[in-house]
Image (cartoon, rainbow, N blue to C red):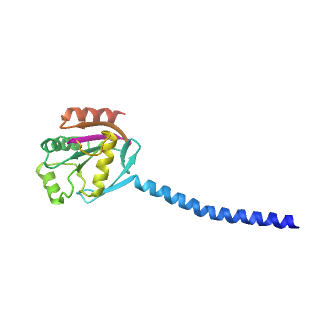
Amino acid sequence: MLRYLSLSLLVCASLFLNGCDKNNQSKHEKSQQQRTKSNLITLQGLDKKEYTFIKKENGLLLKDNGKILIIDIFATWCPPCQAESQVLSHLQEKYPNDIKIFGISVEENLPVEKLQAFKQSHNAQYTFLIPNTQNKELIEYIASNVLHKSNNIPLPLVVIYKDGKLMHYYIGATEEEFIESDIKQLRGK
């Protein structure tokens, strides 16, 4: 009888502990969800739309978008950046179904009006992301993956991703033909 009672207590304790373990499992799931959220960066464009970027091991992906992703890291005061905005605009207009280009400024505290003025004065026909602290996080993430450093980034820096993988990058003003050649190759893959 004592043995039966001991066995019953052991079974009850085991069921109780399994019940407690489910709470630990949900904590683990919450931790995993937080980690997943930390791999997401949501930014707002001048167009008032939100764009969510997914940080991959060696790349970047635009959520819910199968296009080739091109990120232009620039500054409004940078002459090569200003010239390259026209190149990127032309490519966005030429390949609207294949590529999505984002301009992201390294300038902290850049007023939205100044960014809007840059876009208008250079007739830039691609999406510019509104400056904020998350922009800096995205820039540092890209620079550390591409250049293996997160500060003193050469400008402009244009980075091309496909399917979340880094494909090409260009430092400094780059001729349209080089970028377009890479786009054509990636469209074929």
Q: Quadrant of the C terminus?
A: top left
- Look at 31% across and 32% down and name the residue there: 185
In the depicted structure, whether residue 24 falls above or below residue 142? below
Q: Quadrant of residue 58?
A: top left
**Magenta-span inclusion, residue 157:** yes
Q: Quadrant of residue 50?
A: bottom left
In this view of the protein, which residue sits in the foreground, 188 or 113?
113
Whether residue 68 is visible, yes or no, is no
Task: Give the quarter of the figure containing the N terminus.
Answer: bottom right
Foreground of the two, 111 or 187: 111
User: In the image, residue 110 lies at what x, y percent?
Assistant: 18, 57
Q: What secondary structure do most residues of the magenta stretch adopt?
A: strand
> Can residue 125 be seen from the camera position used here?
yes
Q: On the rendered structure, is 75 left or right of 19?
A: left
> Residue 186 is drawn in which quadrant?
top left
Tell me the magenta residue range: 154-163
